Amino acid sequence: MPQSKQSAHENALKENVQQNSIPKKCLSSDPAVPLWQRVPTRTDAGEMAADFIMILSGLKQLGSVQKQKVYDTLYQILKTYDADILLAEVNTRMNTLWVSHKPRPGLGVEIAAMIHEHVPQAKLISQRFV
């Protein structure tokens, strides 16, 4: 696909992901504000937030339809945990998924396992669970 058509299609994909965003969270790609400035460190109740990061191997090599399927799958899984997730973000440049969540024992492992089960190329690479 020519570069200009690919860029236009990637922008349309990003808009679609942003439109499907979990309320008050970010399931988007390449946001304008750096992640370190947006990641919540505490819940509304003042508890320390837990988080993890997964690498989405081969995301860049997928075609647009396959990428959209991955985004839709991630959206559906994260939507299941909407009450517990503080922030979720896909970074398409780095092929990563960052998830910050409330500090419930085993929650991060549960979410990461569910993601890996449905998106096998998603591998847990870093965690800060409580």
Image: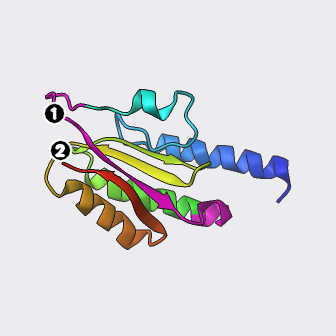
At which x and y percent is residue 6? 77, 52
N-terminal of the pair, mark 1 or mark 2, is: 1
Task: Residue at 43% x, 65% y: name it.
Answer: 123
Labels 1 & 2 near each other (Cβ < 8 A): yes
At which x and y percent is residue 107? 20, 55
Task: Residue at 41% x, 59% y: name it.
Answer: 125
Instruction: Determine the secondary structure under disc 2.
Output: loop
At which x and y percent is residue 21? 43, 42
Q: Does the magenta stretch include residue 50?
A: yes
Instruction: Identify the residue position indicated by label 2 in the image.
Output: 103
Q: Which of 84 and 14 is in front in this view?
A: 84
Chain part drawn in magenta: 42-66
Q: Is residue 26 magenta?
A: no
Relative horizontal placement of residue 44, taking residue 3 as reference (left or right): left
Q: Which of 39 and 23 is in front in this view?
A: 39
Relative horizontal placement of residue 129, taking residue 125 as reference (left or right): left
Q: Which of 93 and 12 is in front in this view?
A: 93
At which x and y percent is residue 12? 65, 45
**Colouring of the image:** rainbow
Quadrant of the rendering where the N terminus is positioned: bottom right
Amino acid tagged 1:
Glu
Q: Is residue 120 above or below residue 46?
A: below
The quarter of the picture where residue 61 lies is: bottom right
Q: Which mark is residue 47?
A: 1
The quarter of the picture where residue 112 lies is: bottom left
Q: Residue 76 carries which label?
A: none
Relative horizontal placement of residue 97, taking residue 57 as reference (left or right): left
Instruction: Determine the secondary structure under disc 1.
Output: loop
Q: Is residue 35 above or below residue 14?
A: above
